[in-house]
Image (cartoon, coloured by chain):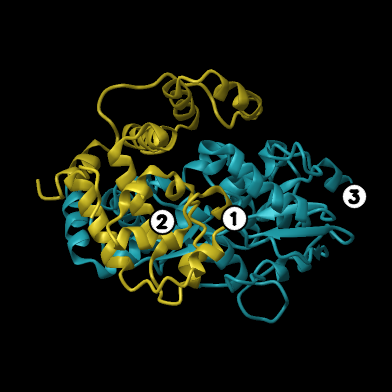
Amino acid sequence: MSGKANPSPGVEHILDRVREQMNPCIQCGTCSASCPNQEFMDLTPRQMWRMVLAKETDTLFDSLSFTMCSACYWCTLRCPRGLPTTHAMEELKQAGALMARPKTRSSDLFYRLFLDNVRQYGRIREMELMGRFFLGMKNPVTPIAYAPLGMALMRRKKIWPKLPSRGPGKLDQLFDGVAAGGDR
Amino acid sequence: MRSYLYYPGCSLTGTAKEYDLSVRALAEALAMDLLEIEDWTCCGATAAQAVDTGLAVTLCARNLALAEKTAAKASDDGDPPSDILVPCSACYLNLKASDKELEKNKSIKAMVDGVLAEEGLVLGGSVRIRHLLDVLSRDVDWEGTGHGLSAPDMTRSLAGMVVAPYYGCQCLRPFRVFDNPEDPHSMDAMIRATGARVLDWDMGKECCGASHGTTKPSAGKMLTERILFAAQGAHCIVTVCPMCQMNLEMFQDRAHPVPVLYLPQLLGLALGMSGQDLGLELNLTDSRELLGG
């Protein structure tokens, strides 16, 4: 059992689901060998499953490895036990996001702003999303790195500045309904 | 004439406008009638799954219910369309995975039904989600076999051109539907029909890094560059996913520059359409040389 105090009930609940899905894992390492992102990870997928099953998740969540999954589905395709490995990795991302750690701030922020944008407009307004992302990152270098791309997209009228609209969001009802479990 | 429900997805209204333009232009040439799903909204992309599974499924379910509604409206003019054509691989996989989840997970289905009912929507499960490449490779007769929608004459031969078919991940995996996810070839017949030659390579099924391009650019760039380096020798790369296309165009500073077209743009060119009809000037890479040749 993990030495450190914590995981919140939300995190534990997610980890229980991942354990249930990954319980038949035989540690063959086909997932790790198939992963195009392995070189950017300090823990391999196979090691991550072992840690989840052994309830040794401190090292797992201290690492950024699970956030490096790009959902290419090679591991899911090839897992000899037919386990939903990519989906389980998504669940680890969900657990990670609940922990709100500084290390995953950029992806957590991006996902949160993305969903705010969907809730407000129904369809993504890419320019507003990226603008808010850069503001939220509070890192002046990021927007500069993306400036040439932004200009190229604006010249082609693929993204365009538009004032954010406030007031009720297009999908408020759906988001609130899901949060309430569908039985309001 | 065959009718399809059409789910463009958010990218096709913005950064991938030319994908939408060229899908519609190609559909018209192939006598496919595209019925855009009324009031469709975002599928949740990768963000919803990384935050909440219930939300991810509900966002997709809303669009599936709207698709059924759009189909029912259209049924006055004959058989209602039952296939949703989806050009974006991420939207395709999200819609399909949600559809499967709703089939097998009764508690999620009950939750989703409750949420959709508030908007007066009902999910009957009567539509089939199909990727654009599935529709093009299986419903259209590129080789003159006499089965499927007949492909019109290719009035502008692309003979002499070498094309690198880039499939990406999510139209191939995890669901094996229309191609072999380990060794995809569904684009071959249509590329050959244009007169072009298919580049013999094995990077067409590898990952471009997807959203790493935004959140972890150094890793994303490395993955994309591997594909670009392997495409040397091709006159263009064709793709069927807006995110792959964007990554392949964005990370070309170290690789040999190569135009990255959407598959319908290439097919449209061979069918004699103008660059403007196909939105070629909207691509970030320059494809003027292709047209000159």
Foreground residue, B281 or A77? A77
Q: Which residue is mark 2?
A: B94
Question: What is the x, y in percent for residue B23?
Answer: 60, 52
User: Chain drawn cyan, letter?
Assistant: B
Provide the secondary structure element on which disc 2 rests.
helix
Chain label for disc 3: B
Q: Report the residue at 85% width, 55% height from top.
A: B233
Residue B86 in the image, given as x and y percentages of width and height: 49, 56
Q: Colour of chain A?
A: yellow
- Name the kind of residue labelled 1 in the image: Cys
Work out whether mark 2 precedes mark 3 in sequence or the reverse, and give the earlier one. 2
Q: CA distance from mark 2 to mark 3?
A: 39 Å
Residue shown at 19% from the left, 40% from the top: A176
Q: Which mark is residue B293?
A: 3
Q: CA distance from mark 1 to mark 3?
A: 31 Å
Which residue sits at x=73%, y=50%? B228
- Marked residue chain, label 1: B
- Give residue B49's position: percent from left, percent from top: 36, 50
Q: Which residue lies under the disc numbered 1?
A: B207
Q: In terms of depth relative to the viewer, which is nearer, A148 or B290?
A: A148
Q: How many marks?
A: 3
Marks 2 and 3: CB-CB under 8 Å?
Answer: no
- The chain ID associated with circle 2 is B
